[in-house]
Amino acid sequence: MIIDWSEWLNLAIRWFHLTAGIAWIGSSFYFVWLDNHLVPPKSGEASGEVWSVHGGGFYHKQKYRVAPSQMPEDLHWFMWEAYTTWITGFLLLVLVYWVGAASFLIDPAKAALTPLQASGVGAAALVGGWLVYDCLCRSPLGRDDRTLGSAWFAVLVAAAWGLCQIFSARGAYLHVGAMIGTAMVGNVFFVIIPNQRKVVAALVAGQVPDPALGKAAKSRSLHNNYMTLPVLFVMISHHYAITFGAGRPWLVLALLGLTGVAVRHVFNLRHRGQPTGRAMAVAAVLALLSVTYVSAEKATLPARATSAAAGPADWASVQPIFARHCVACHAEKPTSGLVSAPPLGVMLDSYDHARQFAPRVRRVAVDAEIMPLGNTIGMTRAERDALGRWIAAGAPE
């Protein structure tokens, strides 16, 4: 019996990452919702309160502007959800994109990097992203969330453009997502939790806590709230070549990321009981722009990909391409030694199989150019165009 430990490890970390992320995002969304629903209390020293019902019980929650006059006996902290999400996400980044840099990260047509060099660039992006974001927060720009958000968005778009010039588009997307996630967990680790510890220490010492500590922590928490949906988009984007396979993938990432921010703003306004019409319109326009841009770009692809004059479009013309570049892995019994079964069940070792999976081949091999992985065996653009012509013609035999 042979156990594929690397696959099981990948699955375990990914499952853990998803579970921790749900816990972190859930608590983050809940506390922002809570803040937006607070009303002045009828009595007591709290600054706001809210009643809610869930699971058959009633809950009465109160918030203090800075801190209560006395330290509670039992105080619950929310931090490990964030830490475990980032740790497991970083492990996945290392395991999939750094260890597997030759297949998933490096694009020889863009930059002739070694796996070590590519990993170094990726690590620098994560560290540099946090440093730039934190400096922006501490600068005069940080006094206004809208100004700060615009500046941080510009930094991320510039990073997306730069990484797309070096890495595969899919690898660039994941690193931009990792940059945002690092900024989010950095807020928790370097600002929110330390400030909360200082407030607790002041209460224990019988001192009045500094209100600025809570204000700064609250501001960073709100930033995290708006960055959540863009990160979630990046997490699922590698399943959809239509996004990172665009001619300007950094622009698609910017549009859809901004759409996520707009959608989050709609919910925040709604929770505060404020009008949402304008924000909803902005979110809808951004989403429509994303779809329209990608569709318009595909409509203007070079005619050689579908032109009948460019070459034949039958099985005899494409079967050698499949045999040369695909069948070693995508066959009932792979011979490459890299996989023990055809990835995702896709088999391209016969006409019937190739015709069945033709739409997927179009997405990942012709349009997005992400297969073969890393293009280590050198599939040419002319070969991709030949596959495109065959598929556009209806995959004839």
Image: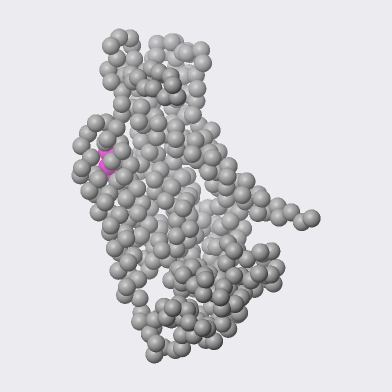
Residue 296: percent from the left, percent from the top?
A: 30, 69
Q: Image point 65% across, 49% down: which residue?
A: 9
Of residues 263 and 146, which is closer to you in this image?
263
Residue 351: percent from the left, percent from the top?
A: 56, 78
Of residues 364 and 222, which is closer to you in this image?
364
Of residues 312 and 164, which is closer to you in this image?
312
Q: How many marks?
A: 0
Q: Quadrant of the image for the N terminus? A: bottom right
**Considering only vertical position in the picture, is 55 above or below 319?**
above
- Magenta span: chief secondary structure: helix
Residue 306: percent from the left, percent from the top?
A: 39, 81
**Considering only vertical position in the picture, is 102 above or below 381?**
above
Q: Image point 28% across, 41% down: which residue?
A: 266
**Considering only vertical position in the picture, is 220 above or below 334?**
above
Q: Image point 29% across, 46% down: which residue?
A: 262
Q: How is the image coloured?
A: one colour
**Considering only vertical position in the picture, is 248 above or below 87?**
below
Residue 36 inside the magenta-drawn segment: no
Stretch of the chain drawn in magenta: 143-148
Residue 92: percent from the left, percent from the top?
A: 57, 50
Is 69 displayed left or right of 335 in the figure? left
Q: Image point 45% across, 24% down: which residue?
A: 55
Whether residue 388 is visible to the viewer of this picture, yes or no, is no
Whether residue 94 is visible to the viewer of this picture, yes or no, is yes
